[in-house]
Amino acid sequence: MLPYQPVNVLTSQLVNLSTMVYQYVVTLKNQNNRYIDILGLLLSIFSIVCFTLELLRSPNVSLAYLLGAVAVLGFVVFNLTQQAKKRKVYYSRALLIAGLVWMKMPYFSWLLFVFVMLALLEYQAKYATEIGFSDNEVVINTLFKKRYLWTQFSNIVLRDGLITLDFSNNHILQREVEDDEDDDADEDEFNEYCHHQLVKHHNEAPGGS
């Protein structure tokens, strides 16, 4: 993970990541977010229904079922509100609470381990890939950082929210980038910077013109 303070999707500010300075950082859209959110929502609703049914069946009011149903419902409502505002949501807290309540349920108690595991993995699964562009290299920040020289690319362009990295070996990486209304730099500035670096490094390479 690249250690830096949060920045815009595309920024022209110098960003110091460890000992390397990146002129631009581009954040790619995580294609799995929608499916992870749907899974979290379905599991939360399933838990609310089961807790409520068990609460109604019990001769005495179970505080665990009551608090669990209310708490998980609260997180669901909050997340749906945030999603309507196009903001990121996380179901990990709802899943952790639901998991603890499932431990007390007369059936499916093993769901505790499933819910806890999913809650712990949610942040990692939703981690957005970032690409850092410096004067010396391009770093793709996935689970393991991948470093590339500018000479390993024939073209890099960002257009209409879509970034294309055209490698010299004819491999192409094309992904949507996160939309941020507060971007400090526009696409033309970024493309001009990349073009300049590509020409510079290819000319400096052995055999370059």
Image: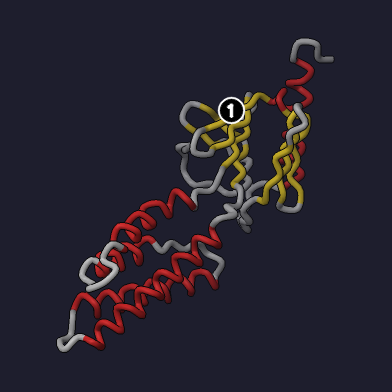
Q: Residue furthest top?
A: 206
Local crowd at mark 1 within 10 Å, few (<14), some, or many (≥20)? Answer: few
User: What is the secondary structure assignment of the residue under circle 1?
Assistant: strand
Rendered location of residue 180, percent (x, y) = 61, 56
Q: Nearer the viewer, residue 202 or 109?
A: 109
Up-down relation of residue 128 to residue 145 (above or below): below
Q: Residue furthest left?
A: 60
User: On the rendered structure, is 61 left or right of 117?
Assistant: left
Q: Nearer the viewer, residue 64 or 1?
A: 64
* Residue at point 63%, 48% (across, down): 184
* Residue at point 73%, 46% (across, down): 187
Marks counted in the figure total 1
- Give the amino acid type for the residue marked by disc 1 in the picture: Arg
Q: Nearer the viewer, residue 64 or 139?
A: 64
Q: Nearer the viewer, residue 111 or 195?
A: 111
Rendered location of residue 20, percent (x, y) = 52, 27
* Residue at point 33%, 78% (across, down): 50
Up-down relation of residue 11 to residue 101 (above or below): above
* Residue at point 79%, 17% (across, down): 203
Quadrant of the image containing the C terminus: top right
User: On the rendered structure, is 204 left or right of 55?
Assistant: right
User: On the rendered structure, is 76 left or right of 151?
Assistant: left
The quarter of the displayed image where residue 179 is located: bottom right
The quarter of the displayed image where residue 205 is located: top right
Residue beneath disc 1: 147
Q: Residue furthest front?
A: 107
Rendered location of residue 90, percent (x, y) = 43, 61
Rendered location of residue 118, percent (x, y) = 39, 56
Up-down relation of residue 29 to residue 56 (above or below): above
